[in-house]
């Protein structure tokens, strides 16, 4: 499983980016840079992560830094999966 590709698919779907996420790389800024990524969208992304990766995202795990870039999301999910 390619975690980054899975995350990009989730972002594209949840944020209705219409394929724009395919252009993203690990340095792509998210929170504060994508108007589609508001507080409600963050909840949708978290829910999608829990479903797709079969992980539990604790409230204490999530802060602005987690959603700062694609790379920070990849690191977070990888750590939850034990990769």
Image (tube, helix red, strand yellow):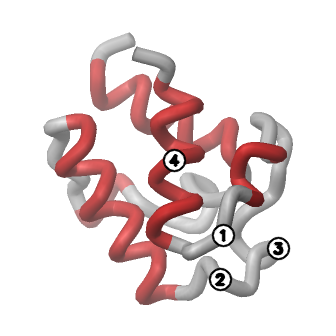
Query: Badge 2 local density, few (<14 within 10 Å), some, or many (20+)?
Result: some
Q: Which residue is mark 4?
A: 9
Query: Badge 1 local density, few (<14 within 10 Å), some, or many (20+)?
Result: some
Q: Secondary structure at mark 1?
A: loop
Proximity of marks 1 and 4: CB atoms separated by less than 8 Å:
no
Above or below, 40 against 56 in this view is below
Identify the mark nearer the N-term, 3 or 1: 1
Between marks 3 and 4 in the image, the one whose residue lies nearer the viewer: 4
Identify the mark nearer the N-term, 3 or 4: 4
Which part of the image, by quadrant, shows the N terminus?
Answer: top left
Between marks 1 and 2 in the image, the one whose residue lies nearer the viewer: 1
Q: Which mark is residue 36?
A: 2
Q: Secondary structure at mark 3?
A: loop
Q: Which mark is residue 33?
A: 3
Residue pictured at 66% horizontal, 69% vertical: 17
Relative to residue 22, is residue 61 drawn left or right?
left
Relative to residue 74, is residue 47 drawn left or right?
left
Q: Could you tell me how far apart the alpha carbons at marks 3 and 4 are, in whole angstroms?
A: 18 Å
Residue pictured at 70% horizontal, 53% vertical: 21
The percent coordinates of residue 68 (x first, y second) are: 70, 58
The percent coordinates of residue 29 (x first, y second) are: 81, 57
Q: Could you tell me how far apart the alpha carbons at marks 1 and 4 are, in whole angstroms?
A: 10 Å
Q: Quadrant of residue 34?
A: bottom right
Q: Secondary structure at mark 4?
A: helix
Q: Nearer the viewer, residue 73 or 1?
A: 1
Q: Which residue is mark 1?
A: 17
Q: How many labels were placed on the picture?
A: 4
Residue pictured at 72% horizontal, 63% vertical: 30
């Amino acid at each position: 499983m390619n975690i980054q590709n899975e995350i990009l698919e989730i972002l594209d779907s949840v944020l209705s980016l219409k394929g724009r996420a395919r252009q993203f790389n690990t340095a792509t800024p998210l929170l504060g840079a994508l108007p589609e990524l508001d507080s409600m969208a963050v909840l949708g992304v978290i829910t999608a992560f829990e479903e797709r990766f079969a992980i539990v995202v604790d409230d204490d795990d999530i802060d602005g830094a987690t959603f700062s870039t694609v790379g920070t999301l990849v690191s977070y999910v990888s750590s939850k999966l034990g990769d």
